[in-house]
C-alpha cells in the first residue's frame, strides 16, 4: 500500500530543494551579469547542493515504488517532479548565459 504521508513529505522536499536550487541559479546569473564570476560559480555550486538533495529524495521514492506493485503517482508528486526538472533545465540555460557573459567580458 502506498504511504501517502511519505509521498507528500518527499514531494515537499523536492519542491523546497528544487526551488532553492532555482533561486541560487538565478542569483548566479545576476552575479555573472555584474561580472562577478567567482561569486556566480559559488552560487551554482550552492544550487547544485540543493538539487542533489532533491534528487536523492526523488531517487529514494522511485526505489520504494519499484519494490511495490502499487503506483504512487499523485498530482503533488507530478508537480514536485516538474519543479526538479525545471531546476535542471534552468541550470543548463543559465550556465550557457554565464559563459556568454564571460566571453563578452573578455572582449
Image (tube, helix red, strand yellow):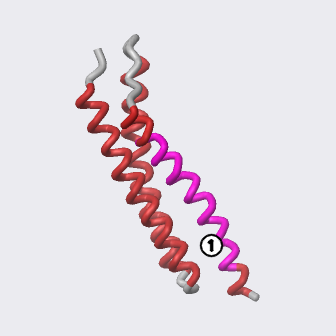
Position in image of residue 56 (x %, y %): 40, 41
Position in image of residue 66 (x %, y %): 43, 19
Residue marked by disc 1: 98
Q: Tell me: residue 93, above or below residue 79.
A: below
At a point 37% along the width and 45% down the height, the residue shown is 14
Q: Quadrant of residue 32?
A: bottom right
63 displayed left or right of 107: left
At a point 26% along the width and 27% down the height, the residue shown is 4
Position in image of residue 90 (x %, y %): 56, 58
64 displayed left or right of 41: left
In the rendered structure, does residue 34 fall within the stretch colored magenta?
no
- The residue closer to the viewer here, 72 or 102, is 72
Q: Which residues are magenta?
A: 80-102
39 displayed left or right of 94: left
Q: Tell me: residue 79, above or below residue 36.
A: above
In the rendered structure, does residue 96 fall within the stretch colored magenta?
yes
User: What SS does tag 1 mark?
Assistant: helix
Q: Residue furthest front?
A: 75
Q: Main secondary structure of the magenta part?
A: helix
Q: Residue furthest left?
A: 5
- The residue closer to the viewer here, 8 or 48, is 8
Q: Quadrant of residue 7?
A: top left
The quarter of the picture where the C terminus appears is bottom right
Q: Residue furthest right?
A: 107
Position in image of residue 41 (x %, y %): 52, 71
State the count of labels: 1
- Mark 1 Cα shell of 10 Å, populated few (<14), some (14-19), many (≥20): many
Q: Tell me: residue 31, above or below residue 25.
A: below
At a point 54% along the width and 73% down the height, the residue shown is 29
At a point 54% along the width and 52% down the height, the residue shown is 88
The quarter of the picture where the N terminus appears is top left
Amino acid at each position: 500500500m502506498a504511504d501517502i504521508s511519505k509521498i507528500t513529505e518527499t514531494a515537499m522536499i523536492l519542491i523546497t530543494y528544487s526551488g532553492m536550487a532555482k533561486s541560487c541559479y538565478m542569483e548566479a546569473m545576476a552575479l555573472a551579469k555584474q561580472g562577478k564570476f567567482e561569486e556566480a560559480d559559488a552560487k551554482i555550486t550552492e544550487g547544485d547542493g540543493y538539487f542533489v538533495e532533491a534528487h536523492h529524495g526523488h531517487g529514494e521514492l522511485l526505489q520504494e515504488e519499484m519494490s511495490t506493485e502499487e503506483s504512487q503517482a499523485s498530482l503533488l508528486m507530478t508537480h514536485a517532479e516538474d519543479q526538479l526538472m525545471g531546476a535542471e533545465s534552468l541550470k543548463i540555460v543559465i550556465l550557457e548565459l554565464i559563459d556568454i557573459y564571460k566571453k563578452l567580458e573578455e572582449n
